[in-house]
Image: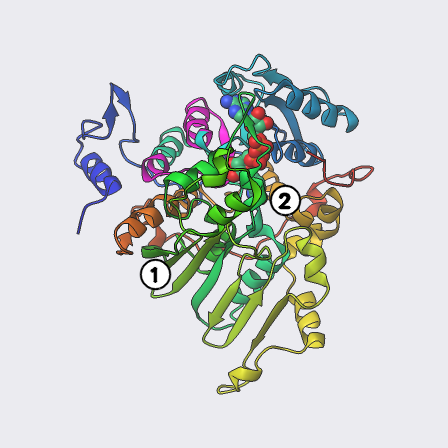
């Protein structure tokens, strides 16, 4: 079997061949930790005050400023954006909340000025909400300059970027967590709770994904880089194959399947349909004089990947942003004793979750119950949901819905990393998770290009997954947060 890059690097280190291994030095710069000290369960001393620097205050970053500023013990002390209008908006969010103005970088449009934020001593944590090509450069630069990183999804875009991020975390002993908000969705956390309490028995298969009709968004984007309308998503469809946005369904499922904590993804196969819907949309909506009328796509409409774990579970992962279809993350889990099936809607998953229908599940009362009648009736569904609501949602659900952000899950996520940092706990997902889940971008493309051949996952943990502690159903002690006069409601309009 082909030796992966990490085996090679760590093997060299154990032999005492410090940093001389090819790939460990580049242009005289050390690229890896000589002993590759693993970071499972990594924690730092409790941070009473968490000072956050937000890079990118666009559609997603501005509401993040609003949310973070409302967490007791957290302050947005720095912001960076190349668009002065976005900086003004972020400062006005802080002003409305009665918070001090943040120190600014990049008002002059300098696309590298975010490095000044990372170099500075005004923040301890970088919260990165930038266009995707900047994710890995920010991961590495920020950690090399002593900052912990919270990175939007996906955390990196190639295996090289994944390794670079892992190595930066290890050599600097810094957190690098991916901000996968859907992991904290109410339905996802209910599934996690039921599965970890053994209600569905042993899970053998999961079906998750990202179905989001983005035809309009991709052909008429609002996002700008350096003042120019940026078609980077559409350009990806025009040039590359594979699933370039894998994490919304995948990370919650990974937690349910104990990925990197007792099991790990071994290989995937990926298959793609022909491309039809985007080209149709271009023809139907733009005149022949517009390049979008005849834009040719390389990526197929629907990408399906099948991931097999070392312990024999199979996860089906779908990516479809092309065809007319309701928003959906899948959330299907099949176990030896039962089933969980969720449907998510984009606008307000929490509201949909409470109305009784979108999430169904059931399990055998005795061996051999007829599976065809396994879903619990609505009364029992509601009772079970109440009983097994995840502790995060029990204690923080109401306040999170008030603050907003995808029905509250964004604030639950932010509260949780803040709680962990303030109390010196490991973060829920670590740099190995960021790398593992982000690897799908390259692995799925490689498989499609090789007629769906199986492609191995790198083991970023170097065997650490075998002994790492499984995820637990954990707590947030809300008694440790003093919300004073309460929170300011509503999502910030971007
Ligand atoms: N988790 C989720 O639910 C979710 C949803 C949407 C987007 N995202 C992710 O969030 C990220 C941002 O997406 P968005 O929709 O907010 O994009 P956006 O274009 O609205 O915002 C990006 C911001 O970054 C700024 N920027 C660009 N280059 C910069 C530079 N060199 N230095 C400083 N600032 C710079 C832009 O001016 C803009 O304000 C993406 O990675 C995307 O994948 C996540």
Closer to the camera in the image, 59 or 103: 59
Residue at horizontal 58 percent and vertical 37 percent from the top: 220
- Please give the label number shown on residue 308: 1
Instruction: Tell me if the residue at label 2 has its CB under 8 Å from ligand 1.
Output: yes
User: Image check: 52 left or right of 260?
Assistant: right
Splitting the image into 4 quarters, where does residue 172 fall?
top left
User: Image check: 447 left or right of 296?
Assistant: left
Say whether disc 2 or disc 1 marks the residue closer to the N-terminus.
1
Residue at horizontal 61 percent and vertical 21 percent from the top: 78
Residue 472, horizontal then vertical, whole percent: 52, 56
Q: Is mark 2 on a helix, strand or loop?
A: helix
Q: Is residue 244 above or below residue 375?
A: above
| Residue 113 in view in this figure | yes
Q: Which residue lies furthest to the front in this view?
A: 288
Residue at horizontal 57 percent and vertical 12 percent from the top: 108
Q: Quadrant of ligand 1?
A: top right
User: Image check: 180 left or right of 480?
Assistant: left
Closer to the camera in the image, 244 or 51: 244
In three-dimensional space, the C-alpha distance between marks 2 and 1, rounded to whole angstroms, equals 29 Å
Tell me, yes or no, whether the two marked residues, 2 and 1, touch with CB atoms within 8 Å: no
**Range of magenta residues:** 134-163
Q: Residues within 10 Å of mark 1 (few under 14, many from 20)?
A: many
| Residue 262 in view in this figure | no
Q: How crowded is mark 2: few (under 14 residues within 10 Å), some or many (20 or more)?
A: many
Q: In this view, does 297 lie above or below 466?
A: above
According to the image, label 2 marks what residue?
410
For the C terminus, the image quarter is top right
Q: Residue furthest top?
A: 108
């Amino acid at each position: 079997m082909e030796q992966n890059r990490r085996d090679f690097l760590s093997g060299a280190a154990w032999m005492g061949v410090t940093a001389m291994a090819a790939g460990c030095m580049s242009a005289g710069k050390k690229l890896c930790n000589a002993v590759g000290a693993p970071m499972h369960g990594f924690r730092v001393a409790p941070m009473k005050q968490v000072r956050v620097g937000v890079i990118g205050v666009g559609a997603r970053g501005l509401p993040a400023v609003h949310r973070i500023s409302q967490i007791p013990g957290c302050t947005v002390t720095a912001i960076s954006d190349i668009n002065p209008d976005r900086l003004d908006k972020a400062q006005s969010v802080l002003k409305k909340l009665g918070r001090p103005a943040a120190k600014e970088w990049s008002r002059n449009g300098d696309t590298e000025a975010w490095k000044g934020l990372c170099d500075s001593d005004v923040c301890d944590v970088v919260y990165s909400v930038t266009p995707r090509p900047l994710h890995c450069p920010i991961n590495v630069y920020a950690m090399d300059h002593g900052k912990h990183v919270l990175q939007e999804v996906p955390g990196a875009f190639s295996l090289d970027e994944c390794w670079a991020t892992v190595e930066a975390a290890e050599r600097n002993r810094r957190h690098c967590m991916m901000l996968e908000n859907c992991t904290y969705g109410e339905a996802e956390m209910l599934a996690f709770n039921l599965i970890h309490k053994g209600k569905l028995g042993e899970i053998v298969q999961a079906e998750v994904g990202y179905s989001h009709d983005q035809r309009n968004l991709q052909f008429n984007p609002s996002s700008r880089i350096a003042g120019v309308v940026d078609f980077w998503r559409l350009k990806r469809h025009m040039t590359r194959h594979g699933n370039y946005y894998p994490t919304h369904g995948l990370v919650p499922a990974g937690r349910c399947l104990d990925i990197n904590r007792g099991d790990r993804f071994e290989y995937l196969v990926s298959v793609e349909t022909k491309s039809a819907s985007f080209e149709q949309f271009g023809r139907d909506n733009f005149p022949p004089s517009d390049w979008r009328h005849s834009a040719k796509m390389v990526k197929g409409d629907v990408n399906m990947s099948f991931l097999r774990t070392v312990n024999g579970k199979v996860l089906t992962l779908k990516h479809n942003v092309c065809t007319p279809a309701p928003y959906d993350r899948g959330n299907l889990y099949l176990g030896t004793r039962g089933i969980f099936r969720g449907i998510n809607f984009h606008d307000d998953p929490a509201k949909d979750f409470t109305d009784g229908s979108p999430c169904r599940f059931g399990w055998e009362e005795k061996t051999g119950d007829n599976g065809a009648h396994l879903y619990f009736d609505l009364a029992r569904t509601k009772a079970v949901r109440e009983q097994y609501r995840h502790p995060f949602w029990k204690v923080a659900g109401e306040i999170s819905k008030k603050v907003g952000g995808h029905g509250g899950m964004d604030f639950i996520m932010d509260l949780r990393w803040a709680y962990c940092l303030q109390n010196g706990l490991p973060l829920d997902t670590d740099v190995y998770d960021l790398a593992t889940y982000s690897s799908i971008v390259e692995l799925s493309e490689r498989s499609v290009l090789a007629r769906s051949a199986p492609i191995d996952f790198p083991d970023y943990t170097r065997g650490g997954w075998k002994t790492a502690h499984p995820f637990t159903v954990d707590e947030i002690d809300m008694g440790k947060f003093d919300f004073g006069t309460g929170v300011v409601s509503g999502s910030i309009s971007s």
